[in-house]
Image (cartoon, rainbow, N blue to C red):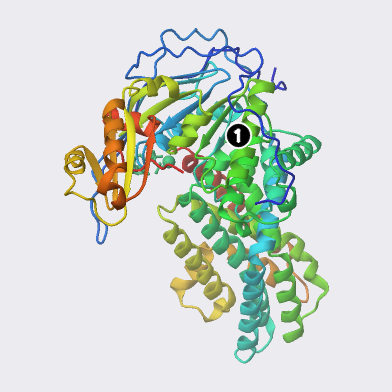
Amino acid sequence: MTGGPATPTTDRRAPAPGRAAHGTGPGMSTTARTAAPRAVAAPAALAPRARLLPALAAVYRAQLSRARVARIPLLFVATFQSVGIMILMRGVVDGGTEAHAVVAGSSVLVVAFVALNLLAQYFGQLRAGGGLDHYATLPVPPAAVVLGAAGAYASFTVPGTLVTALVGCVLFQLPLAQLWVLIAVIPLAGAALSGLGAALGLLAPRPELATLLGQLGMSAALLLGVLPPERLPALLVLARDLLPSTYGVEAFARTFAPHPDWAAVLVDLGVCAGVGVVSLTLATWAYRRAAVR
Amino acid sequence: MDRTDPAPAPEGEAVCVVRDLVKTYPATRGRRGAPAVPEVCATDHIDLDVRGGEIFGLLGPNGAGKSTLVRQLTGLMRPDSGSVRLLGHDVVRHPERAARLLAYLGQESTALDELTVSLAAETTARLRGLDAPAARAQRDAVLDELGLGPLASRPLKKLSGGQRRLACFATALVGRRPLLVLDEPTTGMDPVARRAVWAAVDRRRAEEGTTVLLVTHNVIEAETVLDRVAVLEQGRVIACDTPSGLKAHVAHEVRLDLLWRERPPLDVPEVAALRDSAAESGRRWVLRLAPDEARAAVAAVTGGSAFAALDDFTLATPSLEDVYLALGGSGTGLVKT
Ligand SMILES: Nc1ncnc2c1ncn2[C@@H]1O[C@H](COP(=O)(O)OP(=O)(O)OP(=O)(O)O)[C@@H](O)[C@H]1O
Ligand SMILES: [Mg+2]
């Protein structure tokens, strides 16, 4: 079946060297208890645990490769969606801060699509399909599994976010000089959104619900992040303030101003980081809970 | 002490000791479209001792509670009551220690599906605590040992069922553990792959004293590879012995399988008489008889007009399936391939 070299056959019944034949008395007990199991003297040494950082790196690498194999078409979808939204909005907004909000919102939307929506879906399915058992029977810190997956999904958004931001700047004639701020926006918004996605996926009682919640989260990011806040009703503005992606959008949008308010940018990014810490902690707790049923 | 590989248990010493283990799945109330399910006692006061260096099997039909039992031994599921000791460690109180004592191959693995065979093995080795060079070395050694080299760069998802199972088995072997817990490792495998699995298991037992706890519902496999086997039925151990020890209990019987061409020639009086003791399924009759009765029956069906109606027959010494039936098992769900 494998075309590989034939495996040498060993005589199945040959006892291992030095291995005594086990007694085969005819008496059949109704339990598996042997006559007198020798007491175990001292507990055996435990194999070492995987340490956090190497384990995190291994999970990250594996998840990134998974994402590359299976999710590239979805990254295209996410990018086209964002570019399409910007083209649509070009007829509605007329430059200025509204244009900034549209470009920033569309760029962060790519992050929400992958980190929130796809990660919630992934963890929901992994949990339902018994896939968590694999990790749970390895001596790996829960944080390594969650952070590795979250990090990989966040990294995976980088090309789509960059393309969207570039296209947006060209469409709305915005300066490209401040795009470097994406170096901070993508990981911090990514941490907040992927933490949220992972937590939703691991906490949802059923995988369909995890998928649904992830999609709702992304729709919220789309509506509340892309539409300029000045045009939203008061209730939606409140909802917008509660959504972590908003702060990534705001931070990015502010940098398009002629004289960016860097303090406000830092505050927005700080909120992202704070939400990231909280949601990733929650996701790690949820993972621990889901792993032992 | 933290850096040492766990040493194998001394010969014959109990590696896995289970006492009075109970696990009941709660009843679920019926929802729209989903009928109510009564509670299931999947592990019903089970006692078990697995000794060092042993290949110990759990045999039983679908739903007997085999997976539920091993999931409690691996720290994946908390029992309602009872104790599990692995190599001297209390796994009920410290479920996280199980991962440092054993390697587990679950009945289905979706965690690795989208990885390549090589990355799945390497990642698992890293997560089992190996450093990068050691993980790569073990990956190469195990893939080579199992003949998976040519498939190393293919994603598990794109492999056939048996190939995928073999790749998952490879991940259970990287990073040495003194205890392997394998839930139906050879499902879907062809004879070549099966042999690779058993050769790998044997090698570890011979070289490292590895203990293996194996779930199966395949009686042929159980007879050929296991040192001892516990037969499970509805959450209880109904027998536990060596395969030959178990078979000794039904040694006074032989099994006669008759396959008729169209319908049994019931006009032959000897055949009509056999019908009462036969288990019928379609054109097939299975009879469990004392050896002299069986001889007489064979003579009857192979002579005269009955022979014309006979398509095929086999006369066999008892298998574990017969043991299982003699013990009062329901007799459904055990495969013989
Ligand atoms: N998550 C669950 N919730 C409720 N009942 C369950 C659950 N998992 C298993 N059961 C029930 O517990 C019993 C034992 O199931 P288990 O999976 O342990 O059987 P098994 O011996 O491994 O069967 P198989 O050979 O099909 O793998 C069955 O009656 C099954 O329906
Ligand atoms: Mg099972």
State which chain disc 1 sits on.
B
Instruction: Find residue A232 and report its horizontal and vertical position in percent.
Output: 50, 78
* Residue appearing at x 62%, y 92% in the figure: A91
Q: Image quarter for residue A174?
A: bottom right
Residue A119 visible from this viewpoint: yes
What residue would you read off at disc 1?
A: B198
Horizontally, residue A179 falls left or right of residue B256, namely: right
Residue B76 visible from this viewpoint: no
Instruction: Find residue A146 and report its horizontal and vertical position in percent.
Output: 60, 47
- Above-or-below relation of A256 to B265: below
Disc 1 secondary structure class: helix
Instruction: Compare residues A148 and A241 and report the one nearer the observer.
Output: A148
Instruction: Compare residues A258 and B97 and report the one nearer the observer.
Output: B97
Instruction: Find residue B46 and report its horizontal and vertical position in percent.
Output: 35, 24
Instruction: Compare residues B95 and A181 and report the one nearer the observer.
Output: B95
Horizontally, residue B100 falls left or right of residue B219, namely: right
Horizontally, residue B192 falls left or right of residue B310, namely: right
Instruction: Compare residues A189 and A7 and report the one nearer the observer.
Output: A7
Label 1 sits on what residue type? Trp
* Residue appearing at x 34%, y 28% in the figure: B323
Q: Quadrant of the N terminus of chain B?
A: top right
